[in-house]
Amino acid sequence: MKSKDLVSLIILLSFTSCSVLHKNLTNLNKTKWIHGTGDCKNNIDPPIQIVQLNYNTWVLRQNKCINYEAPFLFLFLGNKKALLMDTGATEDENKFPLYATVRKIIDNWEKKSGIKVSLVVAHTHAHSDHTAADGQFKNKENTTVAGLTVEEVTSFFKIENWPLKNSTIDLGDRILEIIPIPGHQDASVAVYDYETKILLSGDSFYPGRLYIHDWLSFKLSIERLTEFTTNHTISYLLGNHIEMTNQPGKDYPTGTTFQPFEHILPLKVRDLKELNKALIKIGDKPQYEVHHSFIIYPK
């Protein structure tokens, strides 16, 4: 199958897989994600699953048989700009046609809305399973790819006094708040969309193993993120992976390419509060601890 035909098939499958109303969000608590196959040689899932949350918001998931990390990516459209958060775990556009897929989504939206937008590509953090396909977007027309270091992220989003101050990005009648949350990785950020009330928490908080590289920074970040949720309405709290099963406290081993009994993607604010309380109780000495929907995992 040619790459162009493959992208068209991906788009067709995505738009027929769920019913979306104009201002109502798709129920991600009931969404069935592609979750790999016992024998990846026989995997017939598309390389990218696309779920449309509303008329201008999408969640994408990479096929686990292309890369076991199967990261989630998020696309927000405003009246002037589109923002793609993360580019997945695979560089090869033949295996993982991310640019072509995102471009097709935007093209379809532009035709329906009559609005032309530029594309901004940014990242929840700098790890390679979320930045691998950056090259597909670089040097493309009307497209900007943000850098990966703390200095580059701070400059791009105009963040003052990192990591204690937030900043915003305006996509055109759509404001998103950028919240520094170092600890998992130095340049980690969370993203809050004021339109859909979605909060992206990257690899800092998701149903899986919360790898912590800087314990004290992580504690402070989770405290700040928890405080943010007390002052803002949250529709979905979305991380970048699913590693937990639907059995409390049980995760899939690293490298798993078949996860038929996954935890749902969204976590709840009460889960974040549970993490914050656990980190406070543990104190300043890193400690491994298993919870129902996540695992505290110092590195």
Image (tube, helix red, strand yellow):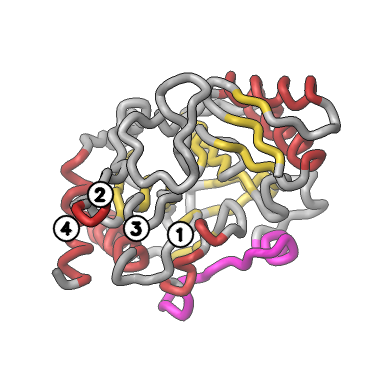
State yes or no: discs 3 and 4 in contact (Cβ < 8 Å): no
Q: Residue at x 38, y 31 (%)?
A: 262
Dot 4 amino acid type: Leu
- Identify the residue position indicated by label 4 in the image: 9
- Tell me which numbered mark, 3 or 2, is placed earlier along the sequence: 2
Circle 3 is placed at which residue position? 66
- For the view shown, which residue lies furthest in the right direction? 284
> Percent x, y for residue 120?
49, 63
At mark 1, the secondary structure is: loop
Residue type, label 3 = Ile
Q: Which residue is mark 2?
A: 39
Alpha-carbon span between mark 4 and mark 2: 22 Å
CA gap between label 1 and label 2 equals 20 Å
Q: Nearer the viewer, mark 3 or mark 2?
A: 2
Residue 75 percent coordinates (x, y): 42, 52
What is the residue that sits farthest to the bottom in this orientation? 139
Q: Is residue 185 above or below residue 286?
A: below
